[in-house]
Amino acid sequence: MTITSRLNRIWISWRPTLLVVLVVFGFRAAVADWYDVPSGSMQPTLLEGDRIACDKTAYHWRLPLIGTVAQRSDPERGDVVVFPSPTDGTRLVKRIVAIPDDVVELRNNRLYLDGEPAAYQPGPEDIPWKLPQDDVAPHVYWRETVAGVGHAVMFTPGAETRSDFGPVRIPAGRYLMMGDNRENSADSRWFGTVDRDAIEGRVLGTAFSLDKDRLWRPRWDRFLRGLS
């Protein structure tokens, strides 16, 4: 058997597998992907051990190995997004707090947008029971609403953090990101705003979740769950 014949046989036998790999790679690179939540910086919205689904077509159309080919829609305040850290490239999950031309400020952990304070109401009483068992610090939970967009946030009294920040005006094409766990999040308070093109996609919710503190027991209530 000639070398050409052998190569043809290898190609024929491996062609279906290669096509599947290319399709899966292309889908994950350009359409949707899923990621592990590596830390508690987005508690109580996302927990360590959640597997999140990310819509990569939310803001732009991309092609594998080429990148962005067209803009689709602009990111909005309150969106939870995935992007690489401007510091070291580590993939991060944070919430967009301010968009271009917003003037944002943090005073004693209270958010102000264009000089108007966010509204705060006590968060749901069942939040502590849903957090990982090793998170024993005393926390306070609020529902933060700014510019009509509300979500749960988590504060840790007495923790050393950057509770005062700004005011700063967000430049064109840039976005300010923060974690919902305000005392345990490396975010735009440290590394600055994030470029629009660096945002990989918008988080849709959790596909499934495993509790590492309980022998990776499934958290059934977090399967196929949208963001609240």
Image (cartoon, rainbow, N blue to C red):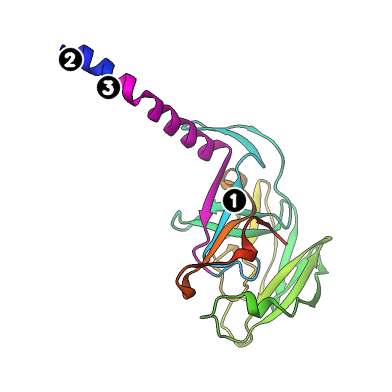
Tell me the kind of residue under disc 3: Ile
Residue displayed at 24% across by 18% down = 7
Q: Residue 53: image x %, image y %?
A: 59, 50
**Camera-side mark, 3 or 1:** 3
Q: Name the residue carrying label 1.
A: 53
The location of residue 226, given as percent across then percent down, is: 69, 56
Q: Nearer the viewer, residue 71 or 126?
A: 126
- Please indicate, yes or no, whether residue 178 appears anywhere in the rendered image: no
Secondary structure under the numbered disc 2 in the rendered image = helix
Q: Quadrant of the C terminus?
A: bottom right
Q: Indicate left or right for 104 with 1 as reference.
A: right
Tell which circle, 3 or 1, labels the residue nearer the N-terminal end.
3
Horizontal and vertical percent for residue 203? 63, 52
Whether residues under marks 3 and 1 lie with C-beta atoms below 8 angstroms apart, the answer is no
Residue 10: mark in rendering: 3
Residue at image x 62%, y 53%? 81
Percent x, y for residue 103? 75, 60
Q: Which residue is mark 2?
A: 3
Magenta part of the chain: 10-39
Classified by dominant secondary structure, the portion drawn in magenta counts as helix
Decide: few, some or many residues near mark 2? Use Cα within 10 Å; few <14, some 14-19, many ≥20: few
Is 2 in front, or is 118?
2
The quadrant in which residue 107 appears is bottom right
Q: Compute the Cα span from label 2 to label 3.
A: 11 Å
The CA span between labels 3 and 1 is: 36 Å
